[in-house]
Image (cartoon, rainbow, N blue to C red):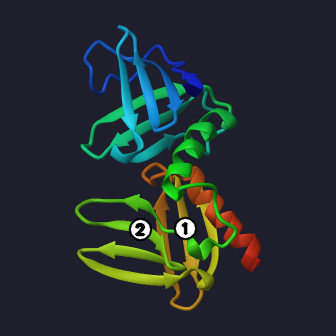
């Protein structure tokens, strides 16, 4: 029934929703996730109801744990601290990425249609039809993926800065607020190899 079960490793868990209850473990299921509460409740979180799967401390190799937060469309959040091994948190993010893309990451990045980050009101950054599109105050600004000059990860600020060569424009993604940090980095790495960006 479950492809993987991940335990919450923190005793001081952030109690965001359920008062004295807290999550003991998160299971990966065929249609999403299931969170197991300490009092025995099991709460299914369906892919179709999930807005983002976020990760804190993704770039931090020193922290004794990593935090995963499943953000729902109704703004409820389910968070747990998990083991610091990158493979552990990536298994959660890869599981959600398969739903976002309806499969694995395609070789042809231009065929991808996915929202990379949400913001306040209608703000979002997405990939669609071979473009990186930023929507702000109801207006779209479109930047072809093949005009990206490079990207840089700023670990202190937890941001990913994408530089475009044609318009001398930067688009900044927040590693904490993107819909799936693993997916964002995989897409950028594939583009970097294909277009031979400077490292």
The residue under the point 47% across, 74% down is: 128
| Observer able to see residue 98 | yes
**Residue closest to the far bottom:** 166
Q: Which residue is mark 1?
A: 161
Within the image, what quadrant is residue 76 found in? top left
Residue 92 is situated, as x and y percent measured from the top left of the image, at 56, 38
Please, is residue 51 above or below residue 162 in the view?
A: above
Element under label 2?
A: strand
Determine the residue positioned at 55% across, 62% down.
160
Residue 125 image label: 2
Where is residue 50? Give x, y as percent: 37, 45
Q: Residue at x 36, y 66 (%)?
A: 124
Q: Quadrant of the C terminus?
A: bottom right
Q: Residues within 10 Å of mark 2 (few under 14, many from 20)?
A: many
* Horizontal and vertical percent position of residue 3: 60, 29
Task: Report how far apart the C-alphas of labels 1 and 2 lie in the structure.
Answer: 13 Å
Viewer-nearest of discs 1 and 2: 2
């Amino acid at each position: 029934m479950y492809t993987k079960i991940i335990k919450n490793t923190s005793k001081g868990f952030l109690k965001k929703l359920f008062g004295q209850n807290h999550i003991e473990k998160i299971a990966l299921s065929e249609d999403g996730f299931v969170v197991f509460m300490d009092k025995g409740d099991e709460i299914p979180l369906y892919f179709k109801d999930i807005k983002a799967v976020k990760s804190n401390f993704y770039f931090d190799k020193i922290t004794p744990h990593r935090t995963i937060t499943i953000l729902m469309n109704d703004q409820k959040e389910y968070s747990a601290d998990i083991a610091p091994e990158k493979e552990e948190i990536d298994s959660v993010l890869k599981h959600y990425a398969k739903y976002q893309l309806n499969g694995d990451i395609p070789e042809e990045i231009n065929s991808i249609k996915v929202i990379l980050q949400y913001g306040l009101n209608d703000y979002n950054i997405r990939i669609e039809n071979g473009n990186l599109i930023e929507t702000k105050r109801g207006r779209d600004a479109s930047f072809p993926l093949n005009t990206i000059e490079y990207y840089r990860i700023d670990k202190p600020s937890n941001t990913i800065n994408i530089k475009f060569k044609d318009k001398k424009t930067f688009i900044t993604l927040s590693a904490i607020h993107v819909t799936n940090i693993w997916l964002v980095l995989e897409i950028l790495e594939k583009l970097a190899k294909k277009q031979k960006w400077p490292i």
